[in-house]
Image (cartoon, helix red, strand yellow):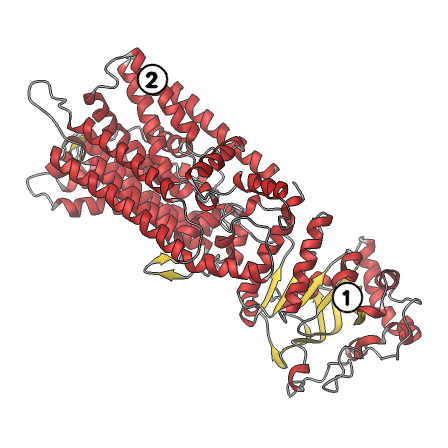
Amino acid sequence: MSTEVEEPPSDAAEADQIASEAAAVAAPDVIADSLGEYVKLWLARVRGGESGALPVLLGLVAIVIYFQARSSLFLSAGNLVNLMTQAAWIVMLGMAEVWVLLLGEIDLSIGYTSAIGATFTCWMLVPPHPWPWPVAVLVGLAVPAIYGGLEGVIITRLRLPSFVVTLAGQLLALGLLLEVMDWAAPGSGGTIRLYSNVLSDIEGGAMSPLAGWIVMVVAVGLAGAMFIVRDSRRRASNLAAPPASVTALKVVVMAIAGVVVVLIGNTNRGVAVAVRGVPWVVPLILVIVVAYSFLLGRTRSGRYFYAIGGNAEAARRAGINLSRIRVTAFVLAGLTAGIMGIIYTSYLGSVSTNVQGGQNVLYAVAAAVIGGTSLFGGRGKMLGAVLGGVIVAVIYNGLGLLGLGAAAQYMWTAVVLLAAVTVDTTARRGRTST
Amino acid sequence: MTNPSADDARPATAGRASAPESDQAPQAQEIQQVQAPAAGDQAAGQDADGADGADGAQPLLRLAGIGKNFGPVRALSGIDLDIPVGQVTAIVGDNGAGKSTLIKTVSGIWHQDHGEIFWQGRPIHLHTPKDATDLGIATVYQDLALCDNLDIVQNMFLGQEPVRYWQLDEITMEKTAKQTLADLSVVTVRSVRQPVGSLSGGQRQAVAVAKAVMRQAKLVILDEPTAALGVTQTRVVLDLIRRLKSQNIAVIVISHNLTDVMAVADRIAVLRLGRLVTVGPKSQFDAESVVDLMTTGTSKRLVAQPAEQPSGSSSEH
């Protein structure tokens, strides 16, 4: 630790020293004055071990290049849309896990509770007397949310480790799933079809090409407007704001990503008849990511998630109700798992007791951790879970495309997960030792 | 009881009350009156109604005959101490002297068994830390209670974030935090959006103190603020304490480091084995006499002053 930091900068060399130290730790947005300086500070941060999403993105590019080299089908429009629908449920489960991982907890039960919720939804939609689909969806979300809440109450009241409670919760949920299925659809062989066109269309249907463009333009426009309003309000209050060129660059990157997704979706992927359009699940995920990020980043409760994950004792002394936030985290994890259950059912066209709940939950943890969420709590973002979920889905999809069955999928996911956790732990060690 | 130190402690506390104190009183317990010329203070402070106190001269916080027992162990007994505004009162003492117990009583961690606490002349009862915080007593413990993953602004407002249209009002928070840090002349942080985990020890201490000041603390208690710091950072923290004083905030510093105490304190209170040995302006002590008082309860080096009989020790029971 340098002592110069303590002194007011009295000469240029000292100021430089301070700049480079601050660069290693503060987000470049808040201290850079120009695009050039932004890039310089960002590079300093990467060298200092605070690389953010960079290694994950580089890893994604490497994996994509590898699969494309092995199979020319990988980057075809048909496969990429297929990839989006596969990634959707992994991303959702990853986001569910982020809620609890932020507090340094874990929820191993969501793989099966999501299936219980989906079973209720499917059962309520079975003809000849189906409930309206929104009611069925509500029940399908409420059941896993309540289940998560009960786990949270046990964890906070009895002060038990969440790992053990949710491991028991996983077994209990599997048992309940078998019971519920037996009661809802006796003699069906443990499967209920999804009889709702609306819900089937989440994964199976697509927006019209025009609607895809409109949604994309509106989304990028709103995000850009939000950035500009925020920056100008900060400048009006004499606070540091990112340089306009940096903000513009961000909007451009978002627009490019949006155009690529819409172009992929709008390319004809049908064989006999033309099939075009971005799957409905893409805007659905977008809305959920924005809502969750708002909750975490812009509200008091969201702030407390990070505070408790960072230093629970400090949070307690600040008057934060730890139990309330912890139980909320498990409820939100359950709710998100409920959404995943419905997306997964939409993807498969039915719900079944053969769901790989134990394996899916490990994909979820992998997605969250690959996306930069710390297993020790206090660090992570919803957008990271999207990135991590996409990587897991790419491996899942690519290895399937190469005809390398389940064995290779498990092993490759294991390698990627291990690499991600290693990066997380080393980064953490680097931070605490400075 | 096999623990020798506990066996030591009790008879010692009880015994000293009668024998050595009567011998040494002229040198050792003289000083209390010096800093309290007003309000007929008489150093005793056992008068429950100091409430009428003479306008500004009445101490912000007055402890009168504070005692605390843990089972058979008397951790504190008969502590009389005034904390005036705009001054730094250092509480020194060896391990087990009762410094932490005293501080925890004032910050509401636990309630005293004997005696009374007066805040601006009114008797108060502190049952929870929140009671103390609400009055304006802020305690900065050694561990600082900061979240390393949150930035400076987020830490300073933790638990009290302003909300505007269902959103955190980041702009108000950042402006207030910057202003508070500027008032304390904490110029060394490049950005208030730096995570606290990246700050040096002195800067972290500054953030913890700024957090207390921003919440309108009238009395800031610092528990071993320089214990883990190097030379330069210690200087930063001592400057910070002086600045608190200049903002008319009362400061209590608990420290083992007599160099720091002599550098920053206006008044020194010496605790030994749960009793207040002496309290007085810094000018009446030097490092050696403080060490003597901390270890033996007396010192021949003290600058001679008119004697004052200790009140709390005899009025207990």
Q: Can the viewer see residue B124?
A: yes
- Disc 1 marks a residue whose amino acid type is Gly
In the image, is B104 to the left or to the right of A67? right
Q: Callout 1 environment at 10 Å: few (<14), some (14 to 19), or many (20+)?
A: many
Q: Can the viewer see residue B223?
A: no
Mark 1: which secondary structure? loop
Q: Do labels 2 and 1 share a chain?
A: no
> Residue at left 32%, top 31%?
A357
Instruction: Where is residue A359? Give x, y as percent.
Output: 35, 28
As drawn, which residue projects farthest toward the front?
A12
Tell me if residue A124 comes above or below residue A72 in the rendering: below
Q: Which mark is residue B274?
A: 1
> Residue at left 86%, top 66%?
B297
Mark 2: which secondary structure? helix
Find residue A349 and report its image quarter. Answer: top left
Q: How many marks?
A: 2
For the residue pair A342 and A366, the one nearer the viewer reads as: A366
Tell me if residue B126 comes above or below residue A366 in the rendering: below
Instruction: Where is residue A364? Give x, y as percent.
Output: 36, 33
In the image, is A41 to the left or to the right of A244? right
Mark 2 sits on what residue? A65
Q: Mark 1 lies on which chain?
A: B
For the residue pair A13 and B71, the one nearer the viewer reads as: A13
- Disc 2 marks a residue whose amino acid type is Ile
Instruction: Where is residue B177? Give x, y as percent.
Output: 50, 58
In the image, is B13 to the left or to the right of A144? right
